[in-house]
Image (tube, rainbow, N blue to C red):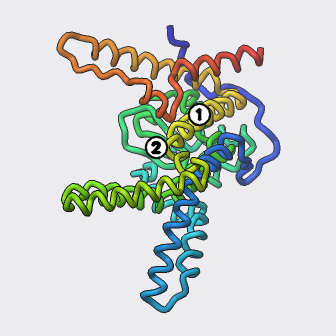
Amino acid sequence: MSPPDHDHLPRHPGRVHIAARQRRTDLTALGSLALHLPHLAASLAVVFVVSYALACLSNPPWWLFFGCWAASGALVFHRPCERLMARCLFGLRYPTPEEDGRLRPVWREVTARAGVDGGAYQLWIEESDGVNAMAAAGHIVGVTSHSLRTLTPGQLAGVLAHELGHHTRGHAWASLLSFWYALPARLAWRLLLRLATRLGRLPTGAAAVVIGVSGAAVAALATATYGLIFLPLATPYLVAAVSRRSELRADEHAAGLGFAPQLMAVLHQERDMEECRRVLAAAPGAAFTKGGMIARLLDSHPDVHTRLHHLQTHVENRH
């Protein structure tokens, strides 16, 4: 049975000290950055080659292009760039006056209780029929229009407290920086894959030479790096595991602010919806796809039952 809805924000003494951001970096954020080091090294090599090629074709020195790319990560915390990312990359919009009137008081309560200046963050809306929210870049906090319409103030506070936890624990900026600095390597890898698909168009002899040279190069690199070049193959699974842990850490943050029951109510609703979808999928004639082990290992979020168990444990330990 689902717990009763919480129509109002729970009473809880707010913290006295208010800081502009009150950020810190926990182990999950550091782990995410560490797991992307191989991609960073590959990106450095790609950007260096491109910068050197551009320097050979034009007057500016290679280190100018290279330095601009290396410093570009600071744009994550630049407000105009964040607004551009919110609109173009994440598909968010500003709240309407009515939405702002519902969202802003709840956000002020959550940030005041956390000892954070709520004005340091930007509130955005995502047009979606799902119950969801997001924390991105340095100051972006987004919530779906459906969540704003259907959740009670207490439940909405629990969701926002979870997203604030991603910001204050460093998950949001670490995730975006990892994505940005790994992008050149990923683009280069996709280009290589496209070139590889065209090997079939080459004459048999030329294709054999290309494959032989590529295989020898990979073998040489594997020997020189003691097999570390194959580490990126396991990175997606490790990154997903760290992401699941960061979600549980954000749940802990919300629970520490006193919003565990409200967040659990939202998760109970999500669990009920998942059960309804499973029942409908199991009906005769309905298409049903069951996620395999690989899909679960690559999932960036823990399952609802795991999150509820951790939150319930936190509530029991406080009593």
**Residue at 21%, 61% in the rendered image:** 202
Q: Residue at x 43, y 49 (%)?
A: 96
Crowd band around label 2 with a 10 angstrom C-alpha radius: few (<14), some (14–19), many (20+):
some
Location of residue 213 in the rendering, given as x and y in whole percent from the top left corner: 39, 61
Taking the view exactly as shown, the residue that stands out farthest to the right is 16
Structural crowding at the residue carrying mark 1, measured as other residues with C-alpha within 10 Å and reported as few (<14), some (14–19) or many (≥20): many
Q: Which residue is disc 2 drawn over?
A: 99
| Quarter occupied by residue 292 | top left
The kind of secondary structure element at disc 2 is helix
Establish if 106 lies above or below 277.
below
Q: Position of residue 310 (x, y in %)?
A: 64, 21
User: What type is the residue that disc 2 sits on?
Assistant: Glu
Is the Cβ of the residue at disc 2 closer than 8 Å to that at disc 1?
Answer: no
Amino acid type, label 1: Glu
**Does residue 62 appear in the picture of this structure?**
yes
Residue at the disc numbered 1: 247
Separation (CA) of disc 2 from disc 1: 26 Å
In depth, the one of 133 and 217 nearer the eye is 217
Residue 218's place in the image compared with 2, above or below, is below
Closer-to-camera residue (23/294): 294
Which residue is at a point 29% across and 57% down the rendered structure image? 208
User: Which residue is the extreme one toward the top?
Assistant: 1
Q: Is residue 97 above or below residue 269?
A: below
